[in-house]
Image: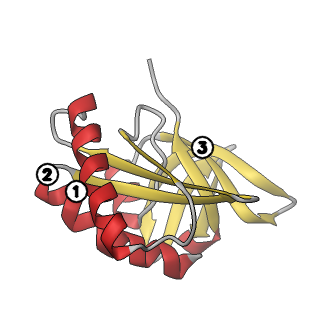
Amino acid sequence: MAGKLEILNELVAPIVKSLGCVLWGIEFVLHGKQTLLRVFIDRENGVGLEDCEAVSRQLSAVFDVEDPIAGEYTLEVSSPGMDRPIFTLEQYVALTGSRVDMRLRVAFEGRRKYRGVISGVEGDEVIIMCDDHEYLFPIDTIEKANVIPQF
């Protein structure tokens, strides 16, 4: 799966950039016979419906030629939103101080789910303050992490 995501990132990032947006991240989800490619884009002043439509049209055209996904799939293009998923170490650094929900690929100390505040990044490890304890999780052990919106 990591190889597929790398190929998709290399294909998608320049298209998104050419349309004045930033590629926030990609989710490639297989559910039985259904495949979903979700592309999150961002922009300094926020993403609008027009941005999502433009990126979707361009990606569809390129994917018709390059055919990076075998078979049928659904393409979704959207803003990462307030509860944005976190994909890269750089995003963790930028979101230092934010509250997050995190799920690990494998249980650590008997649990997979953690809720805490991002304290920073050290090498390839994300530092999370959770339950008055600081945890260091290598980024490749994190299955999913989302910002908890603060109102």
Say which residue appears at 59% left-offset and 66% top-offset.
136
Figure quadrant of residue 128: bottom right
Residues at discs 2 and 1 in contact (Cβ within 8 Å):
yes
Q: Which residue is mark 2?
A: 19
Figure quadrant of residue 33: bottom right
User: Hey, what amino acid is under mark 1?
Assistant: Val
Provide the secondary structure element on which disc 1 rests: helix
Q: Quadrant of the N terminus?
A: bottom right
Judging depth in this view, the residue of 128 and 65 nearest the camera is: 65
* Mark toward the start of the polypeptide (3 vs 1): 1
Report the disc number at residue 116: 3
Say which residue appears at 23% left-offset and 53% top-offset.
22
Q: CA distance from mark 2 to mark 3?
A: 35 Å
Q: Is residue 123 visible?
A: no
User: Hey, what amino acid is under mark 3?
Assistant: Gly
Q: Quadrant of the C terminus?
A: top left
Q: CA distance from mark 2 to mark 1?
A: 5 Å
Report the disc number at residue 16: 1
What percent of the width, then of the height, locates residue 66?
34, 75
Label 1 crowd bin: few (<14), some (14–19), many (20+), radius 10 Å: many
What percent of the width, then of the height, locates residue 105?
72, 65
Q: CA distance from mark 3 to mark 1?
A: 31 Å
From the image, state whether disc 2 or disc 3 is nearer to you.
2
Q: Is residue 108 left or right of residue 70?
A: right
